[in-house]
């Protein structure tokens, strides 16, 4: 038995003329001119008007990968790769105490930036967990306001991000 591809046209004795729009291991989904969408068995009796080949799987690897990445971002604390601004790459952050007798501390900006993005990613996960929790609505709002204020406190570090889409955003309009 030959499997028809998506886009194949058929004439079914009961439903009339239609186009195959989806396929699984047992059925064709066919959109019929007069009856709308119907599922028919792969071995059902019908006339083939026009066949298309090798178009059974219309989901691309890109679509699957995009869906998987989206799911992983939603349900884990896996960090996305966030680029640091070009002018900061390879730079050093120096912390100087007010007392000149004390030693200053140097940190690679790249390491500091990774810590900042981890804080941001963990805040996002916390935000998702609050939103999907069984807490009362008012408790969710209260926690969400704290999270928003934390984002606002971290806006100082936006200068390090290469892309504005990655910035911390606090409360707007206040």
Image (cartoon, helix red, strand yellow):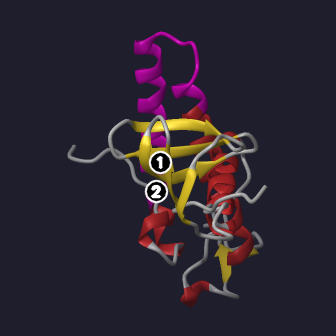
76 inside magenta stretch:
no
**Circle 2 residue:** 168
**Residue at image coords 63%, 40%:** 125
> Cα distance, mark 1 to mark 2?
5 Å
User: Residue 82, relative to residue 10: is it above or below?
Assistant: below
Q: Identify the magenta region.
A: 129-155
Residue that badge 1 annotates: 151
* Location of the C terminus (image quadrant): top left
| Residue sitting at x 50%, y 46% | 30
Q: Is residue 170 above or below residue 161?
A: above
| Label ID, residue 105 | none
Mark 1 and mark 2 residues within 8 Å of each other at the beta carbon: yes
The location of residue 68, given as percent across then percent down, is 69, 53
Pinpoint residue 83: horizontal percent, then vertical percent: 61, 76
Which secondary structure lies at badge 1? helix
Image spot of residue 42 (x, y percent): 69, 44
Determine whether 35 is above or below 166 in the image: above
Q: Residue at x 44, y 58 (%)?
A: 155
């Amino acid at each position: 038995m030959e499997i028809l591809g998506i886009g194949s046209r058929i004439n079914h004795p009961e439903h009339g003329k239609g186009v195959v729009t989806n396929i699984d291991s047992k059925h064709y989904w066919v959109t019929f001119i007069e009856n709308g969408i119907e599922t028919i068995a792969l071995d059902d009796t019908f006339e083939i008007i026009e066949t298309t080949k090798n178009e059974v799987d219309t989901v691309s690897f890109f679509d699957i990968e995009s869906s998987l990445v989206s799911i992983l971002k939603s349900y884990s604390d896996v960090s996305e790769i966030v680029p640091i601004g070009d002018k900061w790459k390879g730079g050093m952050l120096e912390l100087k105490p007010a007392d000149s007798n004390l030693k200053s501390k140097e940190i690679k900006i790249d390491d500091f930036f990774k810590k900042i993005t981890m804080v941001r990613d963990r805040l996002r996960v916390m935000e998702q967990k609050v939103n999907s929790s069984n807490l009362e609505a008012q408790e969710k709002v209260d926690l969400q306001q704290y999270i928003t204020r934390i984002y606002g406190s971290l806006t100082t570090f936006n200068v390090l991000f290469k892309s504005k889409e990655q910035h911390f955003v606090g409360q707007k309009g206040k």
